[in-house]
Image: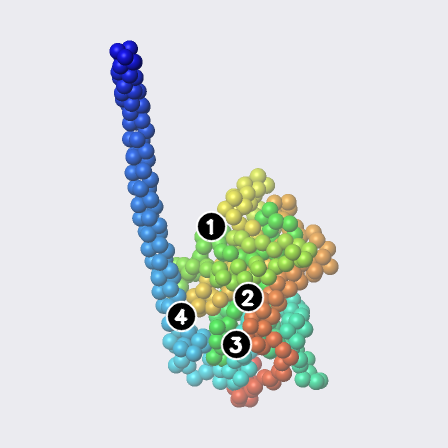
Amino acid sequence: FNSILNLYSQFLRTKAKLTRCLGSIAHPFRKMRKETTTMASQGDQKRDKENSSKVKRDNNDVNEISADDSAMTRMTRYNDGSVKLRNPNIELMDQDILYHLALGSGSHDLHEMFGDVKFVCMGGTPKRMETFAHFIMEEIGYKLPAGTQLQDISAFSYRYSMYKVGPVLSISHGMGVPSVGILLHELIKLMYHAKVKDPIFVRIGTCGGIGVEGGTVVITEDAYDGLLRNSYELAILGKIVHRPAILDKRLVRELKSLATHDDPYDTITGKTMCTYDFYEGQGRLDGAFCEFSETDKMAYLEKLRDFGVVNIEMECTIFAALTHYAGIKAAIICVTLLDRLKGDQVMAPKEVMNEWQQRPQILVSRLIKKHLAQMGHLKSLASTPSSIKSPRRFKLVQQESEAHE
């Protein structure tokens, strides 16, 4: 019996030792688990705080954007949505002569002629925009009255060509920043006089690619100048003024979504650089003058590529800046004629380039048809003849245009 008691006592002592031993082993794990739980709780609190701050920042950003949009809308739109000019002088004028378009607010009924415009499409050459006018007429099913044909509305200006196809204007803008700037001033004023509501401006053009093969369609996301500034610089009364070169991001995304897998070419988005010159300003070696080496040229073009520039042209900054300043949605769609990393001269055959230049027109036609369908306007339309309000003033407009030839 005593032996059994001794064995039982040893068992209890051994059990106690094991319990203490296990307790000492488990204590760090309990402490670690407690610390882990505390850290997790603190992490959750930190994430909640960060998420709350992010939501507040996002809300503030949205509120700031909404406030900016509201302020812009008040400056550029009347209550009915029609275009409002940021120039009080125009309202005080007896008539406003748009002499580069051979139109005038006193000589023509601009509201009757252009009040139904929804899209203003422009490109460099008169022939290209005449071709686009015929193309879009077929695409939207626009019908001219029997015995009539498309007419160049601005023929008497001898500067720009303009065709009206129902709700679409097709206009040539010439080459370079100054030519586009003059046209945009008068087109925006035309929208004002015609009481056009929420127009969309689109530039359809050609460009040189940066690491992009010829024939690629490029939708501009942001416009930059030769110093890679996202703005347009203008000297006004001896002072330098910078205006943001901003394009509508939603319109960019919408255009990109209209490209299809069946298109036998790529459609991309990216940054576009604008220059004031076709040769030296674009780093070409084949101009009449060149004071840099091919190594210098390639280093610059590679810098542009690394910055995200995918194409170069000569109009994007002023187009983006003036449309943004006017509160008008705008987009730029160009086709590349060559990859500038591979050469300077456009070598593609004429028939190939003609086909390439149709590619951005196809994308723009998809945009126009989509919007007209949403508005219930995609149907055969009867054209309205141009309205001359005053023959005498119409003649004065012609004379004014000819005087500035």
Disc 2/disc 3 C-alpha distance (Å): 22 Å
Q: Dot 1: what SS?
A: loop
**Snapshot quadrant of residue 238:** bottom left
Task: Give neighbour class at mark 3: few <14, some 14-19, many 20+ (Cα, 10 Å).
Answer: many
Disc 4/disc 2 C-alpha distance (Å): 20 Å
The residue lying at 60 percent from left, 53 percent from top is: 208
Between residues 52 and 273, which one lies in front from this camera angle? 52
Task: Give neighbour class at mark 1: few <14, some 14-19, many 20+ (Cα, 10 Å).
Answer: few
The mark found on residue 73 in the picture is 4
Inspect this view and state whether residue 289 appears.
no
Nearer the viewer's eye, disc 4 or disc 2? 4
Sequence-first tag of 1 and 3: 3
> Residue type at mark 3?
Tyr
Sequence-first tag of 2 and 1: 2
In the picture, the quarter occupied by the C terminus is bottom right
Task: Give neighbour class at mark 4: few <14, some 14-19, many 20+ (Cα, 10 Å).
Answer: some
Disc 2/disc 1 C-alpha distance (Å): 25 Å
Disc 1/disc 4 C-alpha distance (Å): 31 Å
- The spot of residue 149 in percent (x, y) is 68, 80
Between residues 6 and 58, which one lies in front from this camera angle? 6
> Residue type at mark 2?
Val
Q: In this view, does 319 lie above or below 43?
A: below
Q: Are marks 1 and 4 in contact (CB under 8 Å)?
A: no
Q: Dot 3: what SS?
A: loop
Q: Are marks 2 and 1 in contact (CB under 8 Å)?
A: no
Between residues 324 and 316, which one lies in front from this camera angle? 324
Q: In this view, does 286 lie above or below 251?
A: above
Task: Give neighbour class at mark 2: few <14, some 14-19, many 20+ (Cα, 10 Å).
Answer: many
